[in-house]
Image: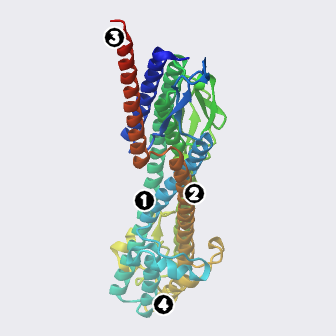
Amino acid sequence: MLGLFGILNLGTRSLSAQRQGVEVAGQNLANVNNPAYARQRVQLATSLTSIGESGPQGSGVDAIAIVHMRSAILDNQIQAEGSVRGSLESQQLALQYAQAGLGAQIDRLASGAEGAAAASGVGGGHSVGAGLSDLFAAFQSLSSNPTSMAERQTLLMKASTLAGQFNQIDQRLGNLRLSLNDSINADVGAVNGILSTIAELNRNISEIEAMSAGQANDLRDARQQQIEMLAKYVKVDVTNGANNMLNVSVDGTALVTDINVTDTLEAYDAGAGQVLVRAVTGGNTLNVTGGSIHGTIEARDVAVATLQSGVNDLASLLITEVNAVHTAGFGLGGTTGENFFNGTTAADIAVNSTLLNDPSLLQAAGVTGAPGDNQVALALAQLADKKHASLNGQSFAQGYGQAVAGLGQALSSVNTQLSDQQAVENMLLRQRDSLGGVSLDEEMADLTKFQKAFAASARLITTVDEMLDTLVNMKR
């Protein structure tokens, strides 16, 4: 039998439980716009049953826990998918920069027989493809009028423009590689900062939960947010440690163990312009398989490197082929042996300054003492259609088109993968929101429910107080 004092205790417990319900609903409402927050629920349970005159009787309700509405499975999936998306986004950005380095928007892809058309179509009159077409057209014009100084000056101007385009592309792609290396350094710095934060959150969670029966839900939310941020930079493996702490490792190297940062990352120059990532303490190079660091390295060492190599090979072949024909010709005064281009790659290709200073030295004739002969000029013009084994049996324009198409295909593939990845991640986020997202309508309903229950419990206590007062007054 509870008695009046037992009922008072029942009312007191109910007041406490409903008050906690109001507090939790208020906490949920306060964090409705916090993306890292997972909603909480007060868990109520019937208090211990006592035996009364009429049988077992309930003694009220207790708030036994504040439940965290999270799913470890969903969190792990979102963390893993975040690494994939981080890699794809950094690849997309790097390839877009490479596209800008070409001075053009790649509107269509081409290879093989369509390469020349695509190359000339990329970037309009300011691309290497258009420059190649202009150069060989100028050779053709010179073959029609080999003694014309105007034609010679026009040819040299077109050749200088093309050389400048090669120089610009090489410089832009070189600067892009440096920027990507800087990006890796910046990402590594961000990773190390997050590792320190996770270790500190491990410490705080462990200490707080050791002193109480419940979970440090808000700190756990913050830790999960940090882990998901970390995953966007680098693919991590997360395991449970002692006292509800989480351990973090990358490629088998432990970085956070309980409350300690056991190792950190550093970017280092591996040579040949390659910045890679290794563990500071362990010293081992890490095989980063996800996150923005992976995407940056992948774009730099595959698509951008392939494009830069292709452009350099094209420039080198152009220099070799044009010079081989030109040096055998004769200028208007019978001079011979001059190269048309100087340099060896796209980085340093340039028109021979001797020719620029005196266009009459252009060696358009095939025999000496015949200024009107056009054999060499015509042979130079015919190089436009010559197929080269080193360009996979393609012409210069087609070879450039293939290099551009390779970048375009890589960018298109990344765009498609990123679109699919975002759909997968959005689905997972919706699933997590359905579990742990805060609903204003639901929280307002709970707030009203707990408020009414609190008022009713207070009314119960008031009633018992009045009954006790009646009993006391009966003695008077």
> Alpha carbon of mark 3 to alpha carbon of mark 2: how far?
72 Å
Could you say which disc has been placed on residue 172 in the image?
1
Say few, some or many: other residues with alpha carbon within 10 Å of mark 1 (under 14 / 14 to 19 / 20 or more): some
* Secondary structure under the numbered disc 3 in the rendered image: helix
Please tell me which of labels 2 and 4 falls first in the chain. 4
Say few, some or many: other residues with alpha carbon within 10 Å of mark 4 (under 14 / 14 to 19 / 20 or more): many
Residue shown at 50%/16% (left/top)? 3
Marks 2 and 1: which is nearer the front? 2
Q: Residue furthest top?
A: 476
> Alpha carbon of mark 4 to alpha carbon of mark 1: how far?
38 Å
> Alpha carbon of mark 3 to alpha carbon of mark 4: how far?
132 Å
- The reply to whether residue 406 is visible in this rendering is yes
* Secondary structure under the numbered disc 4 in the rendered image: loop
Residue shown at 47%/91% (left/top)? 373
When asked about the image quadrant of residue 160, the answer is bottom left
Q: Residue 220, percent across and down?
A: 51, 32
Please tell me which of labels 2 and 1 falls first in the chain. 1
Disc 4 residue type? Answer: Asn
Q: Residue 300, percent across and down?
A: 53, 54
Disc 1 residue type? Answer: Arg
Say few, some or many: other residues with alpha carbon within 10 Å of mark 3 (under 14 / 14 to 19 / 20 or more): few
Q: Which residue is mark 2?
A: 424
In this rendered view, identify the residue nearer to me: 65 or 343.
Answer: 65
Residue shown at 48%/56% (left/top)? 94
> Alpha carbon of mark 2 to alpha carbon of mark 1: how far?
35 Å
Say few, some or many: other residues with alpha carbon within 10 Å of mark 2 (under 14 / 14 to 19 / 20 or more): few
Q: Which residue is mark 4?
A: 374
